[in-house]
Image: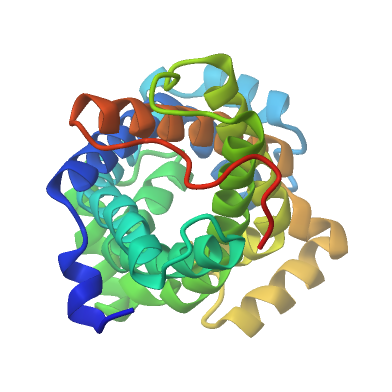
Amino acid sequence: MGGPDDLLSAATPAEAAAGAIAGLCEHVIMFPFDTVRTRMQEFPERHATMRHTFVSMWRTERHTHFYRGCVPVATAAMPAHAAYFSLYESAKRWFGREESSVTHALSACVATTAHDAVSVPFDVVKQRMQADGKHSFASSVACARAVFRASGIRAFFASLPTTVVMNVPHVTVQWVVYERMKQWLALNGDEQLTVDFVTAGFVAGACAASASQPLDVVKTQLQLGKAASMVDAIRFVHSTAGARGFYTGLLPRVCYVAPSSAIVMTSYEALKSVFGVSTKSAAAPGSSM
């Protein structure tokens, strides 16, 4: 194990490029589900179920509203996912013992911190746009300017600590489950587009979404400006919806995260192969931490 400079130098352009393209594909394809989830968390008293939220938006708003806020996400997706995947892979090499679940967990922490530093300001604009059913903002730029005028630069980073706290367990669960399933299914570089790869990504995403749902609700309240701190957000959710409030939007979130994970992981593995990067799992099936 070397120093931090060795960690950064171990990242390869091919892994970064594969991650950037895979991340963009994932976000564009799955964005409408994320919009429905945000509406449910923003207005739980009006949107009790995923179906009700979807039907309500479909009947009362422009259909393009399902993609409101997509521009900042697409803008952030490529650099954020380039950092995310390349640093995950380089961290595995830096920590050594690439087959270990401990290494997978530590590498996930490094990767998600880099990802969130890039994506959080864009995510704030995205969620304000998604919650804007009255079309108050003409564009993502107009939304960003309004947020800045109202709350300053701090508003763009208010949810960063919560996002990192939420994403560390989320991404850790996702990568550990995914890597273990790859080992269990003995997936290798010739099978990027098989059902097994899709299954591994889907199960990993579903597990991660379920584990981190309460913190995702708290993060959403912070990004929508309903609370000034994580503690305030927790109190707000509990006072307005009780303990059940922390699981508001769980179904649409699983419906978003699980297939998103399947898409991004399968795309990433396929693109690594296209770019000539080895996709073989580092351990045999059944190996342990």
Q: Quadrant of residue 22?
A: top left
Which quadrant: the N terminus? bottom left
In the rendered image, the residue lying farthest to the front is 284
Q: Residue at x 47, y 24 (%)?
A: 61
Q: Is residue 21 left or right of residue 23?
A: left
Q: Residue at x 30, y 69 (%)?
A: 117
Q: Nearer the viewer, residue 283 or 275?
A: 283
Q: Residue at x 60, y 39 (%)?
A: 183
In the rendered view, tell whether residue 213 sits above or below residue 49.
below
Counting from the top left corner in percent of width and height, residue 267 is at: 36, 27
In the rendered view, tell whether residue 37 sits above or below residue 228.
above
Which quadrant: the C terminus? bottom right
In the rendered view, tell whether residue 134 sits above or below residue 93.
above
- Asked whether the viewer can see residue 205, the reply is no
Q: Quadrant of residue 211?
A: bottom right
Q: Quadrant of residue 244?
A: bottom right
Q: Is residue 47 left or right of residue 201?
A: right
- Asked whether the viewer can see residue 97, the reply is yes
In the rendered view, tell whether residue 95 sits above or below residue 146.
below
Q: Is residue 17 left or right of residue 204?
A: left
Counting from the top left corner in percent of width and height, residue 125 is at: 32, 55
Q: Residue at x 65, y 43 (%)?
A: 40
